[in-house]
Image (cartoon, rainbow, N blue to C red):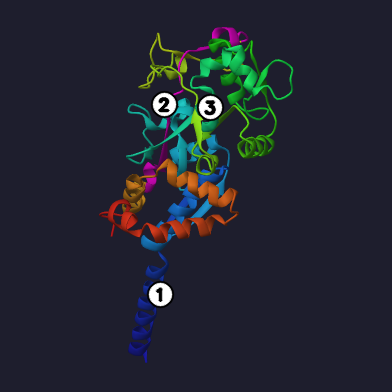
Amino acid sequence: MFKGWKCSVAAAAILAMSAGAAVAKDQVVIGELDWPGSRAIEQVLNQIMTEYLDADVSTISAAQEALYESMNKGDGSVDVVADVWSDHLPAQMKNYVLPGSAETIIFNKTPYEGTEGIFIPKYVADEHGVKALGDLAKPDVAKLFDSDGNGLGEIWAGATGWESNNHTQVRAKSYGFDKTMELTNVDQAIELALLKDAYESKKPIAFYYWTPEWIFAAYDLVKLEEPPFDGYTTDDAKGTDRYKADGCYTFYQPGQRNDWLEASDIKCSQPPTRVYVAHSKQLAERAPKIAQFLTQVTLTPEDVNNWILAMEVDKKPVDQVAKEWIDANRPKIEGEWLAGTR
């Protein structure tokens, strides 16, 4: 009886161990961001890690700053942030990413590029020869964008509270169209409705926007040209590869100094922002194959544009958008993103 009891205990232990092994998946927590492009990327990564790498993936929402602080801590509360606009995060780059920092956050090898600027429909550029941002300082050009007859053209600088309003205000001063154009701040949904109406009627419209976004998959738009970027001049850019003491882009936030508008001067385009998939150093130590996959992910603005279009215009659920893209791109995923991980 005692011998049989020992055998039963041993068998039970083996079964328990087997059951434990079956559920011992790598836990991965993705920090959610609140814009459509990021939600799409998060879902694509989630489904791939779940299907191919047997990960147990969950998500958590928090302010951006808190997500990066959690990745730095390395306690597993946040392992991944899927859409890091690195050039907008100088403090986080200096503290957690760049050589000589804590180096607790790791990026994928190849970022995609996000752009910002002032856009117009291509038919306006073609018909009226409007090519450069400085053209808006010409009264005859500005008149094209005057929809209310007050003698000033309108340019959407972003919704109320957006940082883009400040950048556009500095651009207006620097390029001289503060005398010919007025900045508007209607809600984004209203501006998108105005864009739709303008495009259908072939009317001029000028507005701040960024890529990737669905409107660039739906409309033929062009960015107004500016001289090429050669460097940020302010102290918060020091230590980065985009700092230059006599560079073309001097921008202060209103909270940095009272004379921020007078002290700021933008003489060039804003450089493309390098957008990364980030994971914590602790995840790389805990689940190296998953970390390897994350470093090998290569996204394109075109893919992100189309994901956002499917979500925002076609009203497809984000999980469906991700699954359809994964099914159509398995050779790339399996041959490149997952190379060496299985």
- The answer to whether mark 2 and mark 3 are in CB contact below 8 A is no
SS under mark 2: helix
- The answer to whether mark 1 and mark 2 are in CB contact below 8 A is no
Q: Which residue is mark 3?
A: 127
Q: Crowdedness of circle 3 by 10 Å Cα count: few (<14), some, many (20+)?
A: few
Q: Is residue 153 above or below residue 104?
A: above
Residue 30 seen from this side: no
Q: Position of residue 106 (x, y in %)?
A: 37, 39
Q: Position of residue 180 (x, y in %)?
A: 64, 13
Q: Which residues are magenta?
A: 258-283
Residue at (62, 17) in percent of width and height: 142
- The answer to whether mark 3 and mark 1 are in CB contact below 8 A is no
Q: Which residue is mark 1?
A: 16
Distance Cα–Cα, label 3 vs label 1: 74 Å
Q: Position of residue 260 (x, y in %)?
A: 59, 11
SS under mark 3: helix
Quadrant that contains the C terminus: bottom left
Residue 159 seen from this side: yes
Quadrant that contains the N terminus: bottom left
- Foreground residue among 21 and 218: 218
Nearer the camera: disc 1 or disc 2:
2
Q: Crowdedness of circle 2 by 10 Å Cα count: few (<14), some, many (20+)?
A: some
Q: Which residue is mark 2?
A: 94
First along the sequence among labels 3 and 1: 1
First along the sequence among labels 2 and 3: 2
18 within the magenta span = no
